[in-house]
Image: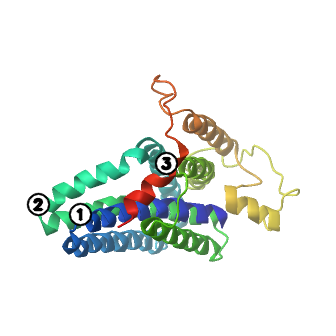
Amino acid sequence: MFSNYLIGLREGLEASLVVCILIAYLVKTGRRDALRPVWTGIGIAIALAMGFGCALEFGSQELTFQAQEALGGSLSIIAVGLVTWMVFWMRRTARHLKTELHGKLDAALAMGTGALVATAFLAVGREGLETALFVWASVHAAGDGTPRPLIGVALGIATAVLLGWLFYRGALRINLAKFFTWTGGMLVVVAAGVLAYGVHDLQEADWIPGITRLAFDISGTIPPDSWYGTLLKGVFNFQPDPTVVQVTVWALYLVPVLTLFLAPVGFASGKGKVKEPDDQGTQSSTASAARP
């Protein structure tokens, strides 16, 4: 449940910040007449994300077992790829997000209502589709037959909406750079578990060999139906009897990706550590942009 809460919080907060910046900019520039098309675009994006999630859930139920496993495994891997790209993208561009959105909004205002709807839709729609796919993959990996994963996602999104509103009102200031670093690192750990489970699905679909070759089996020590087994599975997608391929893929993803993500900005490109802005500037940047 915690991992799904984290997904809802992280993805939802990104979308909330985008909405916050768009709305605040229109209010501060005296263009309240443009709020309706922006909200229309946001509403369409949310509806599309929910429709996409429903299509994944109900469409997969009509497939055979092997087809379900193949679909689940493939989409889990795609979801991990998208989330990995997203956390690195947010880490690199978070400080410039406001300027980028303001530029797109200025261009859309000059082009008319349709451009405003499209700008809001594209800004929020990408986050919504990524969230729907990764949530579906995570819930599918949990597979405990309870509504707890969905409750976790809903609570995470609700928290994100509340935080977005507090940012907009100027009532909350946090160090967003540190927040996205910590949640991004935890999300990489969750993604590693989703990737391992996706590989297991592909093994059950006979797409990848080695389904009978277990790396270890500690089901007697950590029973899957115990409270701590359920906790480990809910947070890390832990499996007490993974295959050799699962463990190998998990390690090959987690170690380099987490190391690169936590490295100083610019490390991978050889530019060295980029000087971080002071905490006060980081904490107040979004709040000051949000206040009408």
Considering only order in the chain, which callout, 2 or 1, is on the residue closer to the N terminus?
A: 1
Q: Are marks 1 and 2 in contact (CB under 8 Å)?
A: no
Question: Residue pushed farthest right?
Answer: 221
Q: Does 212 sit left or right of 50 as displayed?
A: right
The residue indicated by pointer 1 is 29
Q: CA distance from mark 1 to mark 2?
A: 17 Å
Could you tell me which residue is drawn at 23 percent across and 54 percent down? 104
* Front-lying residue, 181 or 250: 181
Considering only order in the chain, which callout, 1 or 3, is on the residue closer to the N terminus?
A: 1
Q: Can you give x and y, in whole percent of width and height, for residue 144 in the image?
A: 67, 70
Q: Amino acid at mark 3?
A: Thr
Question: Residue pushed farthest left?
Answer: 111
In the image, residue 171 above or below residue 94:
below
Q: CA distance from mark 3 to mark 2?
A: 33 Å
Q: Looking at the rendered structure, which numbered label has been put on residue 282?
A: 3
Question: Residue pushed farthest top?
Answer: 270
Q: Amino acid at mark 1?
A: Thr
Q: Can you give x and y, in whole percent of width and height, for residue 218 in the image?
A: 84, 52
Could you tell me which residue is drawn at 32 percent across and 70 percent down? 42
Q: Does 102 sit left or right of 141 as displayed?
A: left
In the image, residue 155 above or below residue 253:
below
* Front-lying residue, 235 or 92: 92
Label 2 sits on a secondary structure element that is helix
Q: Looking at the rendered structure, which numbered label has been put on residue 111?
A: 2
Could you tell me which residue is drawn at 20 percent across and 65 percent down? 116
Q: Quadrant of the C terminus?
A: bottom left
